[in-house]
Image: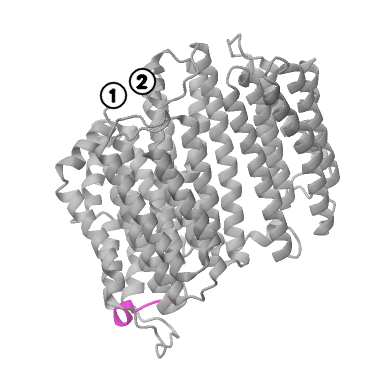
Amino acid sequence: MTNVLLIIFAMSLIYLSIANRLMSYVKILAFQGILLFGVSFIELGEMSPLNLTFILLETIVFKTIAVPLFLKYVIQHNEITREAEPYVPHFISLIVVTTIVVATFLLSNTIENVQLNKVYFVAALSALFTGLYLIGTRKKILTHVMGFLVIENGVFILSLAVGNEMPMLLNTGILLDLFITVLLLGIFVNKIGDVLKDVDVDQLRKLKD
Amino acid sequence: MAIPYLIGAIAIAISLFFNRNKKMNYILVAIFLLLQWAFTIYEYNHQNIVEFDYFLPDALAVLLLITASIIAVPAFYHSYVFFTKNEDNPRNRAMYYASMVVLIFALSMAYLSNHIAVTWIFVEMTTLSASALIYHRRNVRTLEGTWKYIFVCSISITFVFIGILFLSIAVQQLGISDLTFTSLIKRAAELDIFWLRLAFIFIFTGYTAKIGLVPMYTAGIDAKDKAPSPAGALLSSVLMNVGFVGIFRFYEIIAQTSLHSWANNIIMISAVLSIFIATVYMIKVKNIKRMFAYSSIEHMGIVMLGIAAGGIGYYAAILHIILHSFVKSSLFFQMGQIYRVYNSKSIYDVGNYFKYNLTGAMVILLGFISATAMPPSGLFVSEFLIFRSLFEAHYLFVLIFILLLLTIIIWAFGKNIFKLLFTPAVDFKDENVEHIKPYESISQFILLGLVVYLGMNPPLQMVELINEAVKNLPL
């Protein structure tokens, strides 16, 4: 069952590469939150109730509800145009992200480790590189933040894969997740919206040599 | 004493943040400096005793802690000067001092921590406090610098976390769950190569944002440019050492395994590229502060060359990173005075600095000699040893290439510095030039003097500490 959820997660990354509107990005992020909830619920059934509540709170309340709502608020509050404005055509993005997924799949086949479920590895690493690709190829600051959120989802999956025996590490990772996201979104996107009229990466290009 | 220090420093930071009375601020800062020095002396006298499970004042930690405590004193003094000369908004001032206190204690703890995840937490804390310092002036440019810094550092810190996860997979295979450096070094040879390789790539890439190497060096440049000069001095000296600690401690683990030469190659590539990029930008750059920042990139590249070459290079790398901290912080402190004279950081607007600020110009000249590693600068000794180690490790082509690049860097650096010092500035009205008191430069002279002394005639304790710091690395 977790495998199915993780495969759907990888597919959502491919959809992310061709999505055109900011709201579709927000919806995919919320959907990924639900998928992560499913995975962690099945995977971590034997964990202590406190840890479990913590993780479920993170996936459902935070990733699925709070962050998407906040992103939506930022988009409306700052009157950001709804196109994602990529620098490259969607077709190329599609090929690149597919290549990423295939490449991580091939890499995972070289692992001779029985402890680690390879599907986790593939999903996590493809999310990581897809996030980096999104950051590199999209114009708006907000899409950069979304790319970062995709990376965070990948890290979450990876920490689930190893976290069974190291709950301390898992919790640290989740705290990092919460912390940076709140920092980036809460303080910063709002500040940038107040100082600059249009939240566009082009306006933050003054510092260079 | 690690936890009492931590609690004390946090209490001081919080009271600084809420207490906006000017006199109170400076009393609190003075208390913090006393605490910092008491902590440093305590740790120096209690080396290699594990404190509270997670902190171990080993030789490297003690060396860098002393460096940070030395630089902290002039950093607060120059911040005081900065606030007497600039408009003094109580809220921003309180925020500034609070962040500086957080930055200094976070990096002290990051040096000392013996657990890979604890290091990581304190490194994250340095990012947050540093970004508050960068945003001090609260305009569009500083906002851009802060945004880039937070974003790049967040991504890098995530990379480090992924690396730690991979490492923990390798550790779990051995049936242990202990991620302290001491235990990892002991059992390094048994760890799985595949996961260790992935972990090294991610952790190294992540920490390059702090140390300032290719690929993640970019954010640091804008940060040092936009932060007020005293904060910039901390960012380009002791904060870069945090990245070095992160990489070095993991490198100690890798050095025990069969991946050692592979890791050396990765570090070598990154170091050579960093020096190359520093060269390209040193020629091009027109902003003096950014030029100093690129010079830091170059020096970090040289340090990593020493690590990759091995042998005497290990010793030289540690010496180089300590001396570089003193040189670069004194240049950044001096930058504040240049800005007060010319109200500009651009090379086109400055000139004839000897006429307006004699002592300041002396510092710049001596700082230039030190930063380009000309004798009697101590950096000459460490760079010479690093080149020797490269030669002994048969990296002859790398050495020739690096020497060529360094020659270009000295030319570019000198061209700008001599323009600043001797060529009269075009259209510069010198009626209202601020007269800078000579005693404001004393701390820089002391720091630069320390570089000469520590390089030419290093005290025995320091040599022993450096040798102790590199004892885990194979020769």
| Letter of the chain that mark 1 sits on in the rendering | B
| Vertical placement of residue B221 versus B475, above or below | below
Q: Nearer the viewer, residue B106 or B434?
A: B106
Callout 2: helix, strand or loop? Answer: loop
Which quadrant would residue B444 be assigned to in this image? bottom left
Q: Quadrant of the C terminus of chain B?
A: top left
Residue B113 is marked as none
The residue where tag 1 is placed is B474
Residue B256 is marked as 2
Q: Position of residue B360 (x, y in %)?
A: 30, 73
Q: Position of residue B240 (x, y in %)?
A: 42, 47
Going by the numbered disc 1, the residue's amino acid type is: Pro
Task: Inspect this view and state whether residue A108 appears.
Answer: yes
What span is in magenta?
A: B347-357
Badge 1 density bin: few <14, some 14–19, many ≥20, Cα 10 Å = few
Q: Main secondary structure of the magenta part?
A: loop
Q: Position of residue B150 (x, y in %)?
A: 59, 50
Q: Residue at x 50, y 36 (%)?
A: B120
Asked if labels 1 and 2 touch by Cβ distance under 8 angstroms, the answer is yes
Task: Inspect this view and state whether residue A209 appears.
Answer: no
